[in-house]
Image (cartoon, grey):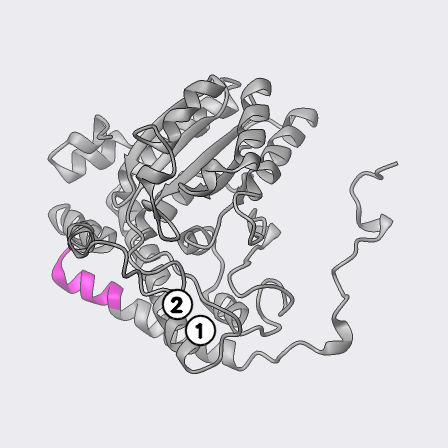
Amino acid sequence: MATAASAETDPRTRLRALGLDREDAVTMYRNMLVTRGIEERGHILFRQGKIPGSFYTGRGNEGAAVGVASATKPQDHLCPLQRDMGVHVTRGLEPWRVFAQYMGRSGGPTRGRDGNVHIGDISLGIVGMVSHLPAMLPVGVGLALSYRIKNERDRCAFAWCGDGASARGDFHEGVNLAAVRKLPIVFIIDNNQWAYSTPSNLGYATEHPSDRAKGYGLQNVVVDGTDPLEVYEAVKEARDKAVAGEGPTIVECVTLRMEGHAVHDDAFYVPKEDFETWAAKDPIERTRKFLLEAGMSEDEDEEIRSGVKRLLVEQLDKAEASPLPDPSTATTGVYASPEELDTPHH
């Protein structure tokens, strides 16, 4: 869905309409480059046998992840999933810590105690995901409910799921409670058009999965997930609405999963022409062209790209130097003591 600002032909005018400047757009661009660079190096680490388990990426989803995260505020809580590495990068998670997480090293956010993409850092407002999707939606709703109970204003929770996961019961339970209570939360559906190998037309009968918002009494917005500025605009408006007490919004970011479900999946079931169509809408190249039209020079672009490459080389070296966790500390941080709780449960 094209918004008024996204319809502007002049890049500077579009940025001004969004309350952004060229440097804001450059930051988004850089964050998308870092995001893709992290996951590309993750593929190499996996083939080298350095990543235990399987490996999941969000190639093609960088614009959606970065666009959403750029519209959040530091006091917000976010519950991103495996396709949303750009959220972690935008919120300030250092790449070496992601690489360390991939490899099960002690420098990772979970200190080698969880799945390689189960990344979370509560100091950055990010709650670590679990594999069961969309189990993080009720978690996000719980966070939003806590803001209401504590009368904490201008705080918003964000919870993600995919198009396939939106068919599960925990999606219904989370969205329904948030709608009834008009909680300060924004729901993000990453519609990458395939629930593993099941196409969208076999997953829901509506045109878009977010169209079901009407059944909960909510609004939905469908945006082009390859355009970070269009995503940013929709999410910013949804956040403003949520913290004003006007209830949640479901923001659906339409993309295509440009790789298989995970490294073990070659995505043979996706028509070749679909990949070709969406490759032409690559969010990084699309943002690069936008910035060139907004005044960025080719030299500036090369400097940004070279800087990202140097950063990731340094960060990967740092991660590889991080030790494996000491087995004797396996239960450290697993159980909370009463002293660690802000408010006693009883």
Which residue is disc 2 drawn over? 263
Majority secondary structure of magenta residues: helix
Name the kind of residue labelled 1 in the image.
Gln
Quarter of the rendering containing residue 60: bottom left
Point out residue 321 in the picture as x, y percentages from the top left corner.
54, 82
* Crowd around label 2: few <14 · some 14–19 · many ≥20 (10 Å): some
- Residue that protrudes farthest toward the front in the picture: 202
As displayed, is residue 325 above or below residue 162?
below
Name the kind of residue labelled 2 in the image.
Val
Tell me the residue at 80%/50% (across/down). 340
* Crowd around label 1: few <14 · some 14–19 · many ≥20 (10 Å): many
Q: Indicate which disc, 2 or 1, sits on the residue closer to the N terminus.
A: 2
User: Magenta stretch containing residue 302, yes or no?
Assistant: yes
- Residue that protrudes farthest toward the right in the picture: 346
Question: What is the quadrant of the N terminus in the image?
Answer: top left
User: Magenta stretch containing residue 101, yes or no?
Assistant: no
Magenta span: 296-305
Question: What is the quadrant of the C terminus in the image?
Answer: top right
Quarter of the rendering containing residue 254: top left
Circle nearer the viewer, 2 or 1: 2
Which residue is disc 1 drawn over? 315
Q: Secondary structure at mark 2?
A: loop
Between 282 and 34, the one lying in front of the other is 282
Point out residue 138 in the picture as x, y percentages from the top left corner.
60, 36
CA gap, disc 2 and disc 1: 23 Å
Point out residue 57 in the picture as x, y percentages from the top left corner.
39, 60
